[in-house]
Amino acid sequence: MKKKLLIIFIIILVLILGILIFKKMTKKEEKTENEIVPLEEITEEQERETMISLYYTNIETNTLMPEARKIDVKKLIENPYKTLVEMLIESPKNDKLKSSIPEGTKVNNATLKNNTLELDLSKEFIENPKGNIDEAKLSIYSIVNTLTELNEVSNVKILIDGKENEKYPNIDINFEEPFLRQN
């Protein structure tokens, strides 16, 4: 009798183990069925692209508006700050936007010190402003808002041909303090 009970117990134990193993295997199969598989492979070219926002002046509202652009990461490797401002000087892709940066402005240098970006621009930035104080502010904040999109930049100190504290000749804005982002 003890042998029969032992055999029945072993058979029941084997059945229970078999059921547990079977359930575990079917769960693994379910997991692989629910895996997300990309529809297409990402090309090497797509892997190197990133999205940036450049702030231009909206022609209709005379306010700053971001324009999203895809850019090859390789262009940003050497000096991303200088590259972004140089892109900002160029015309936007959207015909309802315009560049706020005065004509002839060049980027001499851009250096990050702590969270402040020191941006050295050519004298054309203050000598050729596009109008009144509001236009001058648009050109400043076009740069500031573009650069502060980057996590490491919290404000921008503008230098003119390497000199601090420069001013517009006929507009009451000076560059003593770094500029913070405006929304």
Image (spheres, grey):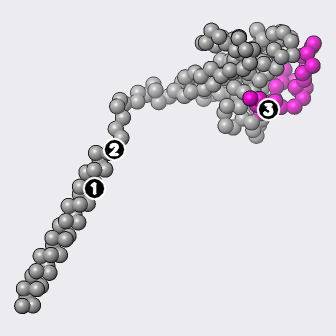
Q: Which mark is residue 27?
A: 1
- Give SS at disc 3: strand
Q: Earlier in the sequence, mark 2 or mark 1?
A: 1
State the image coordinates of residue 1 (x, y, percent, origin top left): 6, 91
Q: Which residues are magenta?
A: 155-183
Q: Quadrant of residue 102?
A: top right
In the picture, measured across the screen, residue 20 lies left or right of residue 140, that is: left
Report the front residue among 20 and 103.
20
Q: Earlier in the sequence, mark 2 or mark 3?
A: 2
Nearer mark to the viewer, of 3 and 1: 1
Q: Residues within 10 Å of mark 2 (few under 14, many from 20)?
A: few
Q: Which mark is residue 145?
A: none
Dot 3 amino acid type: Leu
Tell me the quarter of the image containing the C terminus.
top right
Q: Is 87 included in the stretch rendered in magenta?
A: no
Residue linked to disc 2: 35
- Give SS at disc 1: helix
> Label 2 to label 3, Cα distance in Å?
45 Å
Q: Quadrant of residue 14?
A: bottom left
Q: Is 158 included in the stretch rendered in magenta?
A: yes
Residue linked to disc 3: 180
Q: Residues within 10 Å of mark 3 (few under 14, many from 20)?
A: some
Q: Are marks 3 and 1 in contact (CB under 8 Å)?
A: no
Dot 2 amino acid type: Glu
Dot 1 amino acid type: Lys
Q: Above or below — where is 34 with respect to 144?
A: below
Report the front residue among 109 and 92.
92
